[in-house]
Image (cartoon, coloured by chain):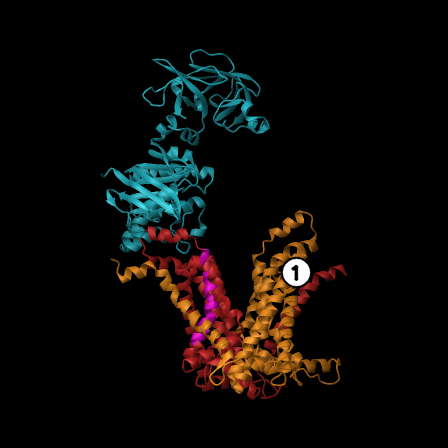
């Protein structure tokens, strides 16, 4: 006869891991399920597609499109800029590497709200950018950047750059430099070595960073809210509008589900794109 | 029985659906250095782990000094293990690693310190006591692992191929130290290895395991080497020449008829059931038992003539590969360069290659044998062993 | 011209870093600006720093943020270690499961939390925030701790038991010290993410409890005040010090070795 204590100790691995799994189920899966259910069902209207039908407007489509484009372009821009930076830090900057990496992590410690807010100082009518451009006589009138899509793009790019650099850096650090030596030993020049060896092997880091930035940019709320407000809606600001301001929970849930679906489709396309890229480089 | 350290009774072990150990009965004597020798994958490490308690057996019983320990958990068994890759605790220094077991037992600090320092002295690490593990060489790390185990004064010390990761010279040194250690401590050592040189050197008693997990022979190193019971043992422990032939027996004595060679004079133990006229058997002749001479000698019971195919220089000995006869014989010829060169030939017409070892006793050889020379091979019938096929 | 090629990449990187730090530099400079609600420079002053320390409001939200950050980090580390230690083999395949909270857009998570808590009539406040942040923290702690644990020589655990230690003793004396680097990095990550979090707090903190990011947000919307600058500059300096202390500890321990 085994005591309860013995039985527990025997299968202690299940018991130990239970809290974490319960946490996941309770606070991730259930909420997600609720959202999906709420998009189809409400106490007043019962089971219905009506909430989704409300979303079939041009305005909604434009908002989704806008966020998609923003997310994709932001990720692309971050990738194109980050790649040379990481290449430099990892391969070329032997003495400065520690300092450079440290400098990369520092911005994380400043709240990104504060970052966005600081951009006001730069982009505003009387801000730094205009002051510099005016004094250099590049322009004659102050340019309007604040409260426009341009502001959103710039600040988004700035905010998410580190999120692209870090995964790339991790992959680059794992890269075995001897592979480059081997490639050159076998006759390839620098450019060929880069495209045939370095690039394909660091692609996984690029993929990770891309998806990370794209996913986060798509649902971004704060930056569009601060930079452009209610003038132009993005997915993040619209969802917040539904839930906090107009309290249309059902439609809001439907829109949330729809957005998630759209993002998923985009992710799929990008995933296929990366596959093709990998094959093409071969 | 206090002179039996470990006993396995009808032990079987399944790994999933694979039967790794089948109905094993083994008795390991107390206070001696016992070696378990076998090729990779034969199950010898499994046996060690069963003794240590890291694995549970499927059926059977294990006794430690007469007590049934089949269901005793690892941390309660009075055995300690020296792991192949040392398994030292990376965040503790040498002293703390060795003291670990004593600390768990809750011994007073002063006593721990005394015992640890004493043991570290035994393994010649007195000057590395407070170093961190990463600063030590492979050999030093292995000594720490040994110290960590023996400081607990276990009833049985289990060693899982402890020298596998070390280079040749270090291996030889540590081997000798292990022998001395066991002699001094009088603890039962159970040593698992696939290296027969190690096994022969250290053990008082050894067991040879075949690839499918059976114990082929049990005995002292000398017994196993000089009187192997099977072809596997003869070939795994050291090198040998195997001749396949048919027994031709009279009332009093037997000889071996080997195709392509003159009849060999052999010593046959008639009491063995498989020794009878007309039976196919194997003859094992160790290379060092064969004399190789250019001139003719008298007084040897067996004589073969052959041509030197290749010579391999080993420093203290020279190995000759001699081609004899020209018709098919039997068991796989020992690997030789000429074999590789002639692999395109049909097996049945492959010539017989005999291995001969000669100690380089003289600084200046009087009668130098070179490749291509015709030589005479001699050995006495007492120096060969008959094996059942 | 050829020789100039060598400078292309470093200049590019330098420009990128400048771009990255531009807002921070501006932020720090303007924390000493002797004017409020304007982007023009009016002279040097430290009065905003003084105001900071006298503000009860700020101290309270700071306290809230710290409580939430420490609690959620602690929970995610504890739960993470439990899962990793218990389920090593299974986790080799399932570790990805814990990544999902990062993949799901934060806004969807926030909505989900809001629903969950209102569905079960749980009042919004610091506890609900802690729970939500723990979920995020788990997404980092599980993979990081698991990766580190996989590097461990499994023989070491057996060696410990062979020397007489029980499962619990082995865990405390051997496993935990080995996992410490991953615990530190996972903990740091979870802590920053919780402390910095705005969106989830926005949805789930309720009206009674404010965290620092929420407070900053309110301040931003109501007008430019250099007190924010002052606060952020202090945090920046503090984190600088933290990182420097941490890396000097790492270097010191290497010296002893």
Specify the colour of chain A.
orange
- Residue situated furthest right in the rendering: C1
**Residue shown at 61% from the left, 62% from the top:** A89
Tell which of A207 and B189 is nearer to you.
Answer: A207
Element at label 1 = helix
Tell which of A244 and B183 is nearer to you.
Answer: A244
- The correct choice, above or below, for C62 with respect to A281 in the image is below
Please, what is the dominant secondary structure of the magenta stretch? helix
- The correct choice, above or below, for C174 with respect to B229 in the image is below
Q: To which quarter of the image does residue B231 belong?
A: top left
- The correct choice, above or below, for B291 with respect to C153 in the image is above
Specify the colour of chain B.
cyan
Position of the N terminus of chain C by quadrant: bottom right
Question: Is any part of residue B150 visible from this angle?
Answer: no
**Number of numbered discs overlaid on the protein picture:** 1
Position of the C terminus of chain C by quadrant: bottom left
Q: Position of residue B256 (x, y in %)?
A: 42, 17
Question: What chain does mark 1 sit on?
Answer: A
Q: Position of residue B293 (x, y in %)?
A: 50, 16
Tell which of C27 and C64 is nearer to you.
Answer: C64
Q: Answer with left or right where residue A246 lies relative to residue A69.
A: left
Residue that mark 1 sits on: A277
Q: Position of residue A250 (x, y in %)?
A: 51, 82
Q: Position of residue B79 (x, y in %)?
A: 30, 46
Tell which of B33 and A15 is nearer to you.
Answer: A15
Is B105 magenta? The answer is: no
Q: To which quarter of the image does residue B266 belong?
A: top left
Magenta region, residue range: C130-151
Which chain does red denote in the image? C
């Amino acid at each position: 006869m085994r005591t309860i204590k013995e039985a527990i100790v025997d299968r202690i691995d299940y018991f130990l891991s239970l809290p974490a799994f319960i946490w996941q189920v309770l606070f991730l899966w259930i909420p997600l399920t609720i959202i999906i259910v709420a998009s189809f069902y409400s106490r007043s209207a019962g089971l219905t597609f009506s909430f989704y039908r409300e979303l079939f407007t041009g305005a909604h489509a434009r908002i989704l499109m806008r966020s998609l484009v923003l997310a994709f372009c932001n990720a692309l821009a971050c990738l194109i800029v980050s790649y040379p930076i990481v290449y430099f830090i990892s391969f070329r900057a032997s003495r400065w590497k520690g300092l450079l990496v440290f400098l990369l992590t520092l911005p994380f410690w400043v709240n990104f709200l504060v970052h966005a807010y600081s951009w006001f100082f730069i982009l505003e009518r009387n801000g730094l950018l205009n002051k510099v451009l005016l004094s250099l006589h590049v322009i004659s009138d102050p340019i309007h950047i604040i409260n426009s899509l341009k502001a959103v793009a710039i600040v988004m790019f700035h905010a998410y750059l580190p999120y692209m650099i870090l995964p790339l850096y991790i992959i680059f650090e794992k890269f075995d430099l001897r592979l480059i030596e081997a490639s050159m030993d076998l006759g390839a020049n620098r450019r060929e070595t880069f495209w045939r060896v370095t690039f394909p092997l660091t692609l996984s880091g690029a993929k990770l960073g891309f998806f990370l930035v794209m996913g986060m940019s798509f649902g971004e709320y704060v930056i569009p809210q601060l930079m452009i407000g209610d003038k132009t809606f993005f997915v993040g600001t619209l969802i917040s509008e539904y839930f906090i301001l107009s309290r249309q929970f059902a439609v809001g849930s439907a829109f949330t589900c729809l957005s998630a679906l759209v993002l998923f489709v985009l992710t799929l396309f990008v995933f296929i794109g990366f596959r093709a890229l990998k094959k093409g480089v071969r | 029985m206090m002179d039996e350290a470990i006993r396995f009774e009808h032990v079987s072990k399944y790994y999933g659906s694979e039967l790794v150990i089948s109905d094993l009965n083994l008795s390991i004597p107390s206070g001696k250095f016992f070696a378990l020798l076998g090729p990779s994958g034969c199950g010898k490490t499994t046996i060690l782990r069963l003794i240590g308690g890291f694995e549970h057996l499927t059926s059977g019983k294990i006794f430690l000094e007469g007590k049934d320990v089949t269901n005793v958990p690892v941390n309660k068994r009075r055995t300690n293990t020296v792991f192949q890759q040392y398994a030292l605790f990376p965040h503790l220094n040498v002293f703390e690693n060795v003291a670990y077991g004593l600390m768990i037992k809750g011994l007073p600090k002063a006593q721990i310190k005394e015992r640890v320092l004493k043991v570290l002295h035994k393994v010649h690490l007195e000057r590395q006591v407070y170093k961190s593990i990463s600063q030590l060489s492979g050999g030093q790390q292995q000594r720490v692992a040994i110290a960590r185990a023996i400081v607990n004064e276990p009833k049985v010390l289990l060693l899982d191929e402890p020298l596998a990761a070390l280079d040749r010279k270090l291996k030889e040194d540590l081997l000798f130290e292990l022998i001395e250690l066991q002699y001094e401590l009088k603890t039962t050592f159970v040593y698992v290895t696939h290296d027969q040189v190690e096994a022969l050197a250290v053990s008082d008693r050894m067991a040879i395991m075949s690839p499918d997990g059976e114990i082929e022979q049990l005995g002292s190193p000398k017994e196993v080497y000089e009187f192997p019971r099977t072809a596997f043992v003869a070939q795994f422990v050291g090198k040998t020449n195997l001749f396949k032939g048919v027994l031709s027996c009279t009332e009093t004595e037997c000889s071996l008829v080997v195709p392509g060679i003159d009849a060999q004079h052999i010593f046959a133990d008639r009491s063995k059931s498989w020794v009878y006229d007309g039976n196919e058997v194997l003859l094992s002749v160790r290379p060092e038992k064969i004399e190789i001479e250019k001139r003719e000698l008298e007084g040897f019971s067996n004589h073969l003539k052959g041509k030197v195919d290749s010579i391999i220089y080993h420093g203290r000995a020279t190995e000759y590969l001699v081609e004899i006869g020209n018709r098919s014989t039997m068991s796989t010829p020992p690997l030789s360069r000429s074999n590789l060169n002639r692999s395109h030939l049909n097996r049945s017409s492959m010539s017989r290659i005999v291995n001969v070892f000669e100690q380089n006793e003289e600084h200046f050889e009087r009668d130098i044998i070179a490749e291509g020379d015709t030589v005479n091979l001699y050995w006495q019938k007492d120096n060969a062993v008959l094996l059942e096929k | 011209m050829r020789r100039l090629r060598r400078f292309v990449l470093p200049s590019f990187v330098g420009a990128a870093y400048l771009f990255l730090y531009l807002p921070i530099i501006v932020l720090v400079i303007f924390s000493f600006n002797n004017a409020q609600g304007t982007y023009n420079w009016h002279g040097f002053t430290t009065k905003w720093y003084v105001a900071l320390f006298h503000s009860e409001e700020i101290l309270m939200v700071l306290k809230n943020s710290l409580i939430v950050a420490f609690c959620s980090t602690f929970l995610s580390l504890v739960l993470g270690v439990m899962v990793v230690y218990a389920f090593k083999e299974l986790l080799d395949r399932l570790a990805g499961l814990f990544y999902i909270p990062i993949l799901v857009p934060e806004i969807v998570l926030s909505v989900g939390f809001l629903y969950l808590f209102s569905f079960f009539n749980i009042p919004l406040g610091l506890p609900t925030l802690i729970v939500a942040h723990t979920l995020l923290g788990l997404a980092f702690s599980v993979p990081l701790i698991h990766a580190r644990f996989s590097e461990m020589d499994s023989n070491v655990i057996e060696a410990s038991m062979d020397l007489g230690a029980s499962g619990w003793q082995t865990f405390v004396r051997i496993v935990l010290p080995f996992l410490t680097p991953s615990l530190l990095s996972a903990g740091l990550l979870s802590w920053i993410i919780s402390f910095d979090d705005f969106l989830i707090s926005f949805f789930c903190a309720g009206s009674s409890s404010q965290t620092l990011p929420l407070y900053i947000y309110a301040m931003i919307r109501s007008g430019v005040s250099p007190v924010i600058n002052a606060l952020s500059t202090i945090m920046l300096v503090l984190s600088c010090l933290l990182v420097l202390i941490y890396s000097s500890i790492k270097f010191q321990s290497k010296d002893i070795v």
